[in-house]
Amino acid sequence: MSRSQRLLNLIQILRRHRFPVTGTTLAAEVGISLRTLYRDIATLQEQGANIDSEPGLGYILRPGFMLPPLMFSEEEIEALVLGSRWVAKRGDARLGAAARNALVKITAVLPGNLQDAPEASALLIGPGAPNLAGSLDLSVIRKAIRSEHKLGINYCDLKGAESIRTIWPLALGFFDDARVVIAWCELRQSFRHFRADRISTLSCSLQRYPRKRQALLKEWREAEGISPQ
C-alpha cells in the first residue's frame, strides 16, 4: 500500500469514529506501527486536517477537512447499490426517491470502466412491504430528528389503548415488518419505541427539546446495550 493510500485510509477511519479513538486502535486498523501512525497524523495535520489529540482518549477528526473525490472499490460500489436499492424499495416515497437520485449521482462520477457496475450488481433486494408506516409522512419525523424538535403524536398501543404523547425523536429504525420511532417520551419519562403504523396523527412542535440528540442517543444505546455503529 502506498503512503498516500495509507493516509487516505487513516482519514476515512477517523471519519467513521464520532468519538476519540486510541492510537493503538488506529495503528491496528491501518496495519502500521504506532511510530508510523504518529508520523502520519503529523503529516495530515500539516496538510490541514483538524485532528485533535485528547490525552487519555485518543484522536478525533474535527469537521471541516475536505478530501478530493475518492475512488470506490468494486465492493464499496456493491454496498452502495445494495443499500440504495433497499431504501428505494422499503423506504417512504421521499426517501426512496432520494436513494435513487443518490445512486444516479454516484454512477455519474464513476470512471467509464465502472459505470456499468451498479446496473450489473448481482446483489438484489427480495420482495417485501414497500411502506409499513401507513399514511404517516416519515419525512416529518426525519426533519424533527435533524432539527431536534419535539413531536406531538396520537398513539395506539398493542392493547388498543390510545394516548396523546409529546416525544423527543432520536432515531428512526427500519425493520422488515415495522418502522419504529426511537424517542424520549415526556409522559413516561423514559425512552420508548413507537411503531409508525400505530401513530394516527402527528404534529411537529416549534419547541426544541432541551438536550442534545447525540447525548440522548448515547444514553439510549447504553440502556439497550447497543454498540455505536
Image: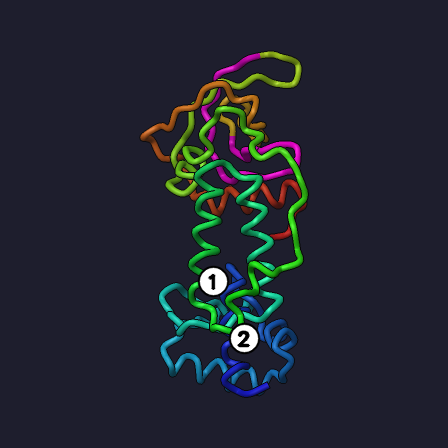
Q: Nearer the viewer, residue 21 or 128?
A: 128
Nearer the viewer's eye, disc 2 or disc 1? Answer: 1
The x, y position of residue 48, in whole percent, is: 36, 77
139 vs 121: above or below: above
Please identify the quadrant where the C terminus is shown.
bottom right
Which mark identifies residue 107?
Answer: 1
Q: Residue furthest top?
A: 161
* SS assignment for the magenta stretch, majority: strand
Q: Which residues are magenta?
A: 162-184
Q: Nearer the viewer, residue 120 or 56?
A: 120
The x, y position of residue 119, in whole percent, is: 56, 58
> Crowding near pointer 2: few (<14 within 10 Å), some, many (20+)?
some
Label total for image: 2
The x, y position of residue 15, in whole percent, is: 49, 65
Q: Nearer the viewer, residue 89 or 53?
A: 89
Residue 134 counted in the magenta span: no
Q: Nearer the viewer, residue 128 or 164?
A: 128
Q: Helix or strand or loop: what does disc 1 sit on?
A: helix
- Residue shown at 63% from the left, 38% from the top: 175
- Residue shown at 61% from the left, 77% from the top: 30
Disc 2 marks which residue? 9
